[in-house]
Image (cartoon, rainbow, N blue to C red):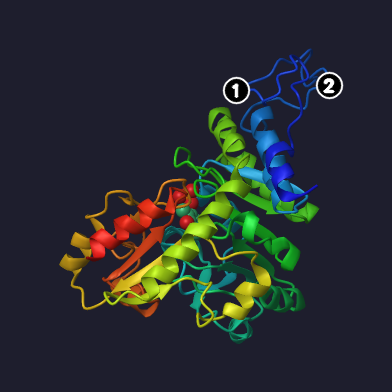
Amino acid sequence: MKFGTRAIHAGQEPDPTTGAVMTPIYQTSTYWQESPGKHKGYAYAYARGKNPTRSALEKCIASLENAKHGLCFSSGMGAIDAVAKLLRPGDEVITGNDLYGGTYRMFTKVFAQFGIKFHFIDLYDANNISNYINENTKLVWIETPTNPTMQIVDIAACAEITKKHNLTLAVDNTFASPYLQNPLDLGADIVMHSVTKYLGGHSDVVMGALCVNDDKIYEQLAFIHNSCGATPGPQDSFLVLRGLKTLHLRMKAHCENGEIIAKFLKNHPKIEKVYWPGFADSPNHDIAKKQMRGFGGMISIVLKDATLEDTFKFASSFKVFTLAESLGGVESLINHPATMTHASIPKEEREKAGVVDSLLRLSVGVEDIEDLLEDLKNVLA
Ligand SMILES: *Cc1c(COP(=O)(O)O)cnc(C)c1O
């Protein structure tokens, strides 16, 4: 079945006890056992391990990523944490130098102290990975498009290298969403989502997900999932099931609005630079065209000759765009990475990755484009 149909139906059947068409919110922490260990044919014992609302959601997200297995976590960071826990002291990880701030913080402040070594490298050319591989390398962790400078990493080229060296390739697919890109189809082993963003789509849930095809990796992750316990509740699972039903419609609108706004900003005299992977002259545009089905609604801009104070004033002057962290909701947001989402990255590291003080990130929502353009025109006037 095609994407939109799966977004609405995958993992969901009328409830076997009542016929409810929408998957009920199974608000229970535990399940009746007929005799100890015997569940009368139900596969459920305790809700950290499994809950029917969450199971439906996990099947739906897995289906959208063309994956055999899905696991939902209580946040995107919870999902990344589970992947990092596949590692042992002495293991090494190769990752990009333009990572989500929270991922950088977890790698450097939490997992480095357990003896895991991280290499933060330039992934413009995926072959650069080969320069950092040694006998301790276990995992390659990439994001594409990256946050916030929308750099494109060639997933298939990374997979070719990781397969050759028997490494695990994990892709944070939050920015593209499965509507635009399916990393497992390109050879990745694990795909991760901050479900909080496009999958949930309404800025009312914090959740994460992992999707895999390999049964062995799934068993390991499912063990960590249940053992460490970062599992989401049934109410949030229900909200995301509802959000997913319009993912394809929302993404189409995000892409359309994103393109119009990116092109408007690119020609504006007060804007120094626009980061959006859909421009023909944007770095690795040919790879973006090859591995993505559209370019999305995430755009970053650098204001021309703007001080930090000018940038703050600009970011606070919108009527429709809301100044807030996060992205991927139906409403348009504006964010100042240097002091908001990326504040945990040292200034020097940040600026090396292009996250200068005059950079702002837009999450273009699905409002009427005329209103979004007018908002931008007024602030830029
Ligand atoms: C938000 C985000 C995360 C973290 O997800 P949470 O749901 O906030 O824990 C990870 N990666 C990317 C690219 C993100 O945007």
Q: Is residue 238 above or below residue 315?
A: above
Circle 2 residues within 10 Å: few <14, some 14–19, many ≥20? few
Question: Residue 41, labelled with which disc?
Answer: 2
* 366, 105: nearer the viewer: 366
Q: x, y (%) of residue 279?
A: 51, 76
Which percent across, then down, holds residue 88? 60, 62
Does any atom of ligand 1 lie closer than 8 Å to the CB of label 1? Answer: no
Image disc number at residue 61: none
Identity of the amino acid at label 2? Gly
- Look at 58% across and 72% down and name the residue there: 92
Q: Percent x, y for residue 245?
A: 63, 39
Q: Nearer the viewer, residue 13 or 35?
A: 13
**Of the residues under marks 1 and 2, which one precedes in the sequence?**
1
- Residue at coordinates 59% horizontally, 51% vertically from top-left? 82
Classify residue 190 as left or right of residue 80. right
Snapshot quadrant of residue 176? bottom right
Q: Secondary structure at mark 1?
A: loop
Question: Residue 40 appears in which quarter of the rendering?
Answer: top right
Disc number placed over residue 29 in the picture, else none: 1
Q: CA distance from mark 1 to mark 2?
A: 18 Å
- Compared with 107, 134 (above or below) is below
Residue 31 seen in this snapshot: yes
Q: Secondary structure at mark 2?
A: loop
